[in-house]
Image (spheres, rainbow, N blue to C red):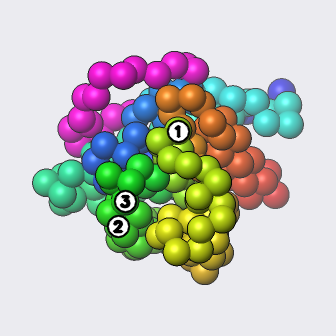
Amino acid sequence: MSDAFKFKIVIVGDSAVGKTSLIKRYTTNSFEKDYISTLGMQFSKYEANVAGDKVELFLWDLAGQETFSTLRGRFYTGSSGAIVVFSLSPEEIETYGHVTKWLSDVKEACGNIPTILFGNKADLVDQNALATSPNYATSDVHVNKFAQDNKIIKYYKTSALTGQDVKEAFQALIFKLYQRAAI
């Protein structure tokens, strides 16, 4: 086995969309029901294996509150990839409207790094409505087109609560980073 590949991944999105819960689900396969807001930034390290190579992930969970916007710039430095998270919950639909701002922040600070889009809290919505309703703001059709138009690797509907597509979504980004680094 060769030296480890090391990737810093920033996870961004509005407050309370589930960024910390997604990281916890991926790294420990657990979920905590009690919500504790991230203040500033939280950092996690996780080791994975891709094609027989050791991969060290440094997951930077950035606070979504506007009061931390001036601090975020320095937390983006050195990022290899990004995950932008919004909530699929009907009560939090406005978080999807802020995805463009988050993408812009990432691109401004990091350039065109590989990015994945997570629509989290899929357990709180009717999956059939998302798949078939073209009038719903976060329908699969709208979000997939948005992802394609913005050169996002892929869009995943995730649930930190149930684990739906969390592992697959993280692994898609990690594999893309690995492919770029292994060249």
Is residue 116 shown above or below 112?
A: above
At numbered mark 3, what does the secondary structure look like: helix, strand or loop? loop
Per the image, is 82 magenta?
Answer: no
Q: Is residue 147 visible?
A: no
When asked about the image quadrant of residue 142, the answer is bottom right
* Residue hosting label 3: 93
Q: What residue is shown at x 13% (from left), y 54% (from top)?
A: 67
Left or right, 70 with respect to 16, comes to left
Label pair 3/2, CB-CB below 8 angstroms: no
- Point out residue 181 in the picture as x, y percentages from the top left corner: 73, 53
Q: Is residue 34 visible?
A: yes
* Residue hosting label 1: 123
Local crowd at mark 3 within 10 Å, few (<14), some, or many (≥20)? some
Q: CA distance from mark 3 to mark 2?
A: 10 Å
- Amino acid type, label 3: Ile
Q: Residue 5 versus residue 176: which sits nearer the camera?
A: 176
Local crowd at mark 1 within 10 Å, few (<14), some, or many (≥20)? some
Q: Residue 144 versus residue 78: which sits nearer the camera?
A: 144
The N terminus: image quadrant: top right
Q: Which residues are magenta?
A: 28-43
Q: What residue is shown at x 58% (from left), y 21% (from top)?
A: 29
**N-terminal label among 1 and 3:** 3
Q: What residue is shown at x 36% (from left), y 22% (from top)?
A: 33
* Residue hosting label 2: 98
Per the image, is 37 magenta?
Answer: yes
- Amino acid type, label 2: His
Q: CA distance from mark 1 to mark 3?
A: 14 Å
At numbered mark 2, what does the secondary structure look like: helix, strand or loop? loop
